[in-house]
Amino acid sequence: MTSLSQHLQTHWQQLRGMTYDLLNVLSAQYLTKSLPFATSQDIQYQFFCMLGTQESWLPVLSSGTMESWDCSLMPAPEGDALSLADVKAHFEAADQALFAQLAQIDLLHPVGDGNPPLHHYMVLVEHEAHHQGQLINFIYALDLPIPPSWADKWALHRGE
């Protein structure tokens, strides 16, 4: 019988797999691109925020409290792009840490804030999906390639 933590790991692999699919169709030059308005962050900021939140979320799963927000991937200097390989490697390490955490905790037993870790996992999923939504804006505004998994999951296409 498949455990709840195994189901969540499979779910996360599918969701994060879409992020990997996008990384696989991008070239590094796109990472510094922004949307066409003054306050837009660039694409690499989206990945930085996704990764930092995932890394910072591990204590939330076990205690219900975020100790601090930090990201193992330092932002590139202004105007420079991060390495796509570095972004992927940091995501992969964070995924392994998340899977280890999910396997070690009782996902249904309330933690310090009164919510079970499953609730906190769902909030992390919402954050990831939010950033995928932001990245869809970049895909359309900058005419970036649409990965097949994104076309399927989010019904994306370019109309004629």
Image (cartoon, helix red, strand yellow):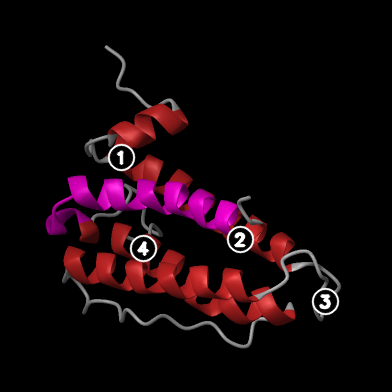
Discs 4/2, front: 2
Mark 4 and mark 3: span between their CA atoms? 28 Å
Q: Which mark is residue 113?
A: 3
Image coordinates for residue 132, horizontal then vertical, percent = 44, 48
Discs 1/2, front: 2
Q: Which residues are magenta?
A: 6-30
Q: Earlier in the sequence, mark 3 or mark 1?
A: 3
Q: Residue at x 52, y 57 (%)?
A: 9
The front one of 49 and 142 is 49
Secondary structure, mark 1, is helix
Q: Which mark is residue 5?
A: 2
Q: How crowded is the residue under tag 3: few (<14 C-alpha within 10 Å), some, or many (20+)?
A: few
Mark 1 and mark 2: span between their CA atoms? 32 Å
Image quadrant of residue 8? bottom right
Image coordinates for residue 129, horizontal then vertical, percent = 52, 49
Discs 4/3, front: 3
